[in-house]
Image: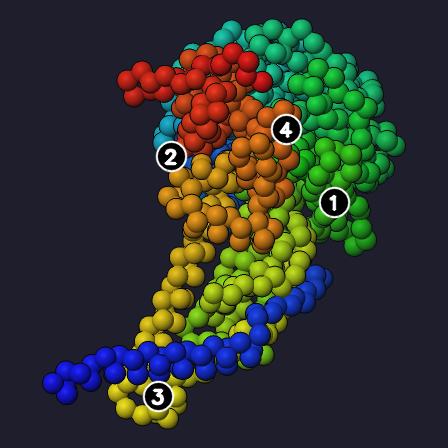
């Protein structure tokens, strides 16, 4: 009886000892204070070198990135170049850090017959991973279009057009799946053809306007809007013209001149379009000297940009991006791109003849955050032996990747091979703590891009130097997370072609907890040991819980970023949380500055920081407004078609369609496995 009655007392004693031990440990930890972090940084003088050599024949390298969410090869980067009889392809499957072996194709000019010589290949990626290459047979001006559906391993003939010019270009619109090919026939007429079924059938070439050979017309398209940029006039008085189509390239009723007649007649203009329908054109102009090439004197050149915000109908007065000495880039096309946030990037080069037979070239990339009004420029320098060859480095090209990444290729004719690099910088540094780290607790370092409301880079400090490579130029907020605590260390700039060295200093809550074993020994006996064991389990549980909580918050943040304007109900159902848990994590994210809310009459709407919502009477996100507009234009459209047209993930579109239908802004009907969307009367 006595033995059995001791059980409750042991339990009570255990609780007392556990509470005492936990109190002492908590007091010790509290004495350290909350986690504190500070940040020191310096931008180093040495350049950030992340170039990759390309093993391609030919100087004029063209690149393309698979950005289609529906593609099995999404994120693949392709580079192509050609010689007289073949074209060769290289692929990168790791974001441009490495390229695989060169694949050579000679089916266009088999046998290396001198009567069959090739021009310059161009490349583009369409929907569902379809890859296209276009090239011409010089002797016949015949354009050949090839298509690959297996990541460039094999190619099939897609189309052939006679009298299409010596040089042609190709572009795709992943909103509609359309593919466009442009060229100039021997008479100087600009021609454009289009395919809507992945290159299986093509419209007859359309006469856009009279152009100026040998410049290559360039095309950019978004949905029904298509803009073709080309040189018109003659060799002594060339100007950049743009033709505009609003029916997918079938008719071209509008043509505008966007430059004065002081151009480099050998330099092809560039044209690009943002994901939200803003078109931009750039070109090179000779300001002094006898021309754009090096002809006994050094001309002064300038790069200009004009941006259209009305679907290409009008292009305002051009803005000078930069003025520089040297010779023109005769292959100027693809020198202008938008990233995912409608920031405009342009590239050019300057050249100077230096003593001792050297020639120095600086390659520039400028970025504009205000649609071309101003540019932030960064450069790296290339120096090599040789004369003042005017076109020593005249083949810079840009291509937009995913996650705001921009990639540059360039070629020095005196210093092959061609090279590839991301337009980025790096940050590297270490974490210094005033007290030892807690056993088993990791120190996480995160670089947060507040403009995009995303964690751009993340690493765990393990005592060795942290390196964050391939960072787009930006100011990043640095966060530290230790166990279940977090702190903002500060803001740190990263610049293009530069390295930022940083040191994060920790204090406060980073100290180790007081060990429970001396407390157990002082109390004596099995009860104290049990208390210590329980405390250890409790600490482990708390650490695991915090890790899980961070993962849940990451899921919530990713969902809000994919679905700006999502309601509380949308978020909790998407992540699978109870009301209280979802509310708690949303408050944490809002307190950390990663999301913000707007309150309506009945609902609260969540947005990622940096999102510019275009509210009117109803709190609709840009994606939701686009969905309503698309459904109005095509009643009965399916959810998957909506996702393809808007270049959004299917799940993201499905969530938003459900929300719009619940609010009475859309009506949905299920036909078999397909959900069709219809507009509702009075939807605005």
* Disc number lying in front (1 or 3): 3
Give the image's coloring scheme. Answer: rainbow
Q: Residues within 10 Å of mark 4 (few under 14, many from 20)?
A: few
**Residue at the image point whose x is 53% and y is 50% from the top:** 587
* Disc number lying in front (4 or 1): 4
Q: Is residue 527 left or right of residue 491?
A: left
C-alpha separation, residue under disc 4 versus residue under disc 1: 34 Å
The residue identified by callout 2 is 72
Q: Nearer the viewer, residue 574 or 622?
A: 574
**Residue at the image point whose x is 72% and y is 47% from the top:** 378
**Residue at the image point whose x is 36% and y is 31% from the top:** 150
Task: Please tell me which of labels 1 and 2 falls first in the chain.
Answer: 2
Residue 520: assigned label: 3
Q: Are dots 4 and 1 in contact, CB under 8 Å? A: no
C-alpha separation, residue under disc 2 versus residue under disc 4: 35 Å
Q: Residues within 10 Å of mark 1 (few under 14, many from 20)?
A: some
Residue 615: assigned label: 4
Quadrant of the frame with the N terminus: bottom left
**Residue at the image point whose x is 53% and y is 53% from the top:** 588
Residue 170, position in %: x, y? Answer: 54, 23
Q: Quadrant of residue 36?
A: bottom right
């Amino acid at each position: 009886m006595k033995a059995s009655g001791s059980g409750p007392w042991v339990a009570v004693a255990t609780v007392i000892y556990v509470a005492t031990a936990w109190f002492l440990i908590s007091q010790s930890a509290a004495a350290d204070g909350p986690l504190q972090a500070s940040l020191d940084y310096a931008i180093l003088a040495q350049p950030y070198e992340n170039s990759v050599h390309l093993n391609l024949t030919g100087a004029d390298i063209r690149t393309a990135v698979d950005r289609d969410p529906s593609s099995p090869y999404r994120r693949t980067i392709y580079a192509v170049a050609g010689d007289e009889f073949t074209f060769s392809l290289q692929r990168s499957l790791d974001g441009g850090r490495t390229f695989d072996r060169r694949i050579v194709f000679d089916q266009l000019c088999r046998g290396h017959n001198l009567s069959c010589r090739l021009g310059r290949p161009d490349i583009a990626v369409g929907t569902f991973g379809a890859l296209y290459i276009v090239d011409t047979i010089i002797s016949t001006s015949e354009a050949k279009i090839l298509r690959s559906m297996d990541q460039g391993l094999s190619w099939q003939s897609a189309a052939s057009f006679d009298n299409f010019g010596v040089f042609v270009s190709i572009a795709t619109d992943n909103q509609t799946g359309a593919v466009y090919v442009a060229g100039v026939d021997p008479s100087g007429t600009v021609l454009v053809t289009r395919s809507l079924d992945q290159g299986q059938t093509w419209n007859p070439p359309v006469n856009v306007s009279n152009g100026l050979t040998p410049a290559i017309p360039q095309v950019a398209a978004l949905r029904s809007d298509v803009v073709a940029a080309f040189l018109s006039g003659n060799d002594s008085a060339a100007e950049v013209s743009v033709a505009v189509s609003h029916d997918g390239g079938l008719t071209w009723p509008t043509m505008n001149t966007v430059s004065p007649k002081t151009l480099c007649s050998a330099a092809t203009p560039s044209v690009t379009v943002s994901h939200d329908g803003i078109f931009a054109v750039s070109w090179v102009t000779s300001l002094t000297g006898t021309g754009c090439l090096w002809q006994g004197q050094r001309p002064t050149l300038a790069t200009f940009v004009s941006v259209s915000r009305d679907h290409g109908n009008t292009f305002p007065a051009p803005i000078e991006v930069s003025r520089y000495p040297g010779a023109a880039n005769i292959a100027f096309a693809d020198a202008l791109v938008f990233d995912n946030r409608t920031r405009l990037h342009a590239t050019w080069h300057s050249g100077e003849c230096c003593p001792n037979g050297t020639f120095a070239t600086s390659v520039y990339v400028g970025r504009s955050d205000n649609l071309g009004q101003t540019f932030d420029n960064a450069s790296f320098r290339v120096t090599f032996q040789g004369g003042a060859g005017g076109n020593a480095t005249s083949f810079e090209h840009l291509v937009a990747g995913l996650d705001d990444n921009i990639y540059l290729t360039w070629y020095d004719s005196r210093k092959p091979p061609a090279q590839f690099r991301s337009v980025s910088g790096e940050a590297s540094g270490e974490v210094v703590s005033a007290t030892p780290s807690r056993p088993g607790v990791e120190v996480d370092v995160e670089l947060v891009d507040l403009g995009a409301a995303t964690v751009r880079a993340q690493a765990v400090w393990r005592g060795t130097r942290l390196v964050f490579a391939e960072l787009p130029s930006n100011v990043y907020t640095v966060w530290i997370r230790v166990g279940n605590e977090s702190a903002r260390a500060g803001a740190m700039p990263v610049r293009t072609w530069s390295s930022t060295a940083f040191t994060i200093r920790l204090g406060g809550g980073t100290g180790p907890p007081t060990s429970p074993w001396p407390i157990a020994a002082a109390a004596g006996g099995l009860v104290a040991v049990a208390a210590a064991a329980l405390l250890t389990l409790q600490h482990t549980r708390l650490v695991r819980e915090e890790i899980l909580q961070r993962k849940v918050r990451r899921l919530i943040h990713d969902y809000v970023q994919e679905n700006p304007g999502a309601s509380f109900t949308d978020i909790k159902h998407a992540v699978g949380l109870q009301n209280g848990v979802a509310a708690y994590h949303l408050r944490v994210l809002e307190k950390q500055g990663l999301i913000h809310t707007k309150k309506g009459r009945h609902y609260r709407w969540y947005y990622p920081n940096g999102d510019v919502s275009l509210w009117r009477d109803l709190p609709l996100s840009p994606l939701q407004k686009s969905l309503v507009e698309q459904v109005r234009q095509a009643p009965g459209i399916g959810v998957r078609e909506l996702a393809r047209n808007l270049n959004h993930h299917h799940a993201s579109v499905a969530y938003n369609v459900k929300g719009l239908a619940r609010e009475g802004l859309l009506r949905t009907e299920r036909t078999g496995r397909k959900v069709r969307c219809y507009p509702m009367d009075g939807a605005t």
